[in-house]
Amino acid sequence: MDSWQELHEHFLALATEEDRLVRQTAPPQWMCALYEYNDALPYGRWTIARFISESLCERFEMRATQAGIALGLPTGAKPMDYWLHRLLEYLRDNNSQYIRGSQRLIDHLCEASANYCARLSVEALEAEHAGTAPIQLPKAPSTIAEYVQIQQRQREARLVAEAKVEARKKFAAEQELERLRAASTPPVGSPITVVQESVASQLNRLRDECGISIEELAYQVGLHARSVQRHLASETAVRSTHLSAYNRVFSKLLKRNIVIRKMP
């Protein structure tokens, strides 16, 4: 019996026990794993939820930790997080019903893990038949002191990995800041072009910011809607009296002093 088959049987036993307990509750809810990913968490941050008993949850975490180590744990990764990350990839590849994408969770966690172990067991048997060695589970810690040492090494590796990620982010941010500064500073001796905004452009921008219709603007300014349309389309020049009315209305609506300037 290979190691993945043993893990399959352990997860299946947990799933059977859970199913018996869950069906005694209403509504039935099976253990699930919630996840989130970001640049600093390439294997995700996982939270076990909806477990029917603490004992069942602890035993699942023990088996998931062993399975994560068996997969060949990357530097800095937590064993259980890595197992659930790989489980999620397997379920996605197979369009599994256990994935609740909108809720970002894996449902029926024990049963899903048992199925994935069955697949890994098949792959191990195929590899053995092809003459390549299957993945073997590492020896579990025999003492509390040994377990603490393993946890300490993994924690140190994780801190180093997180520090490298932060350093890369800081370097990228500094590079981007330098690029923006260089782009915003004109070369010495080059002429500075000032782009002036037309009255019509200013009126359209302010009307969009207020979110009012042409008819409402015309009513508040005291003009016919067709006159306002001509102003907005630059079809006619805006008189000084009308400009003052526009300033008054937009200042009131936007609650700040608005001064529409004419192009020289």
Image (cartoon, helix red, strand yellow):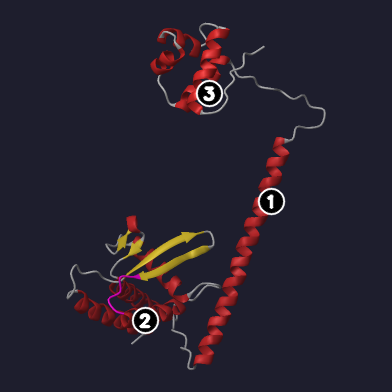
The residue pinned by badge 1 equals: 174
Q: Farthest residue to the right: give it.
A: 189
Residue 197's tag is none
Rendered view: 6 above or below 207: below
- Contact check, label 1 and label 2, Cβ < 8 Å: no
Q: Give the residue type that dot 1 points to.
A: Glu
Where's residue 254, x and y in %?
50, 28
* 23 is higher (above) or lower (below) than 140: above
SS at badge 1:
helix
Residue 237: % across, % down: 55, 6
Dot in front, 3 or 2: 3
Residue at the location (67% across, 55% down)?
171
Q: CA distance from mark 3 to mark 1?
A: 40 Å
Residue at x-position 56% and y-position 86%: 149
Q: Is residue 54 magenta?
A: no
Q: Main secondary structure of the magenta part?
A: loop
Callout 3 crowding tier (Cα within 10 Å): few <14, some 14–19, many ≥20: some
Find out whether the residues at labels 3 and 2 contact each other: C-beta distance under 8 Å: no
Q: Of callouts 1 and 2, which one flags the residue occurring earlier in the amino acid sequence?
A: 2
- First in sequence, mark 3 or 1: give its number: 1
* Label 3 sits on residue: 251
Q: Which residues are magenta?
A: 49-53
The percent coordinates of residue 151 (x first, y second) are 53, 82
Residue 214 shows in the view: yes
Identify the amino acid type marked 2.
Glu
Residue designated by label 2: 58
Residue located 40% across and 18% down the image: 216
